[in-house]
Amino acid sequence: MKSILYILLLLLLSCEYLTDAAFTREVSVACVLSNYYERQEIYIYYTSEGAQNIRNRDSLFVKDAGVEVSSLSQNIPFYLNKNYNDEHPGWVYKDSGHKLKVSGGTTYRLNIKTDAGTVSGATTVPDSFTIVFPRPGEYYEPESILTAEWERKPGAAIYFVEHLTPPDTVFSYRTGKYEVRRFLSNFSTTGNAFALGENSVLKKGNHILRVMACDINLKRHLFDDIDISGLKGGYGYFGSAYVDTVSFFIK
């Protein structure tokens, strides 16, 4: 599911804020809370006037913000961390002290304090659900079209689905070496079922299906192209998702 967050983050970083009046620096936020993450992450940038090269955005990261996420039972501060992920190196705020527990059906509130002002937000995680088909660890015939199904629960504005094929050895032009990879296909739906293998025979081996139930804030930003979603006092999005994953096999 990280791939979705990085897509959203690139959209955030590519924004321009041009006005007829004198430019006022504000704050842009990117955050998706999810039970899928080991640690929750929040990206916070200052807005800039005019187009900027994304690779040079490190200087715009807000490194001295006071960041806190709370629910009825938790009040967790987030701390600045160096981010060594190849897809987005730089800085990130994480719940690196006490871990924030993200549960379905729970409302979380965000509070960020910077020298450009305060940004607040709220998101309610969609209720927990289970993928009911395919079933974990089971084997299916290669000619079958598998219709994946999952429980429909409250709070899901849209479902984002990822299907990872069995591992394969491919040549990487970036590294000049052969690498073992799974190929990813994704799609979205407002229903609770989707056909896998409709356009091609499902490949023999281990497949992974991941379903992400998105809250309304994430849906508005990702699919409705709304610049401010789930936030007050800043740009960007504060959303959430509940995720279930199943591993199955094709004979």
Image: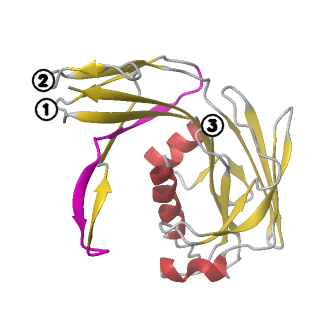
For the point 38% across and 23% down, the residue is 137
Q: Which mark is residue 201?
A: 1
Q: Amino acid at mark 2?
A: Glu
Is disc 3 surrounded by few (<14), some (14 to 19) or many (20+) residues within 10 Å?
some
Taking 38 as reference, is 18 left or right? left
Q: From the viewer's perspective, is the residue at label 2 or at label 3 nearer? A: 2
| Location of mark 3 (residue) | 35
* Residue 156 among magenta residues: yes
Residue 233, relative to residue 163: is it above or below? below
**Secondary structure of the residue carrying numbered label 2:** loop
Q: Is residue 227 visible?
A: yes
- What x and y, as percent, mark residue 150? 43, 19
Q: Which numbered disc, 2 or 3, marks the residue that appears first in the sequence? A: 3
* Residue 111 among magenta residues: no
Estimate the spatial distance between the alpha carbons at disc 2 and disc 1, rounded to whole Å: 6 Å
Q: Which numbered disc, 2 or 1, marks the residue that appears first in the sequence? A: 2
| Location of mark 2 (residue) | 143
Judge by depth and name the residue closer to the eye, 165 or 95: 165
Judge by depth and name the residue closer to the eye, 37 or 190: 37
Estimate the spatial distance between the alpha carbons at disc 3 and disc 1, rounded to whole Å: 32 Å
Kindly check if marks 2 and 1 are in contact, taking CB atoms under 8 A apart as contact.
yes
Q: Amino acid at mark 3?
A: Asn
For the point 82% across and 36% down, the residue is 71
User: Residue 114: which quarter of the image?
Assistant: bottom right
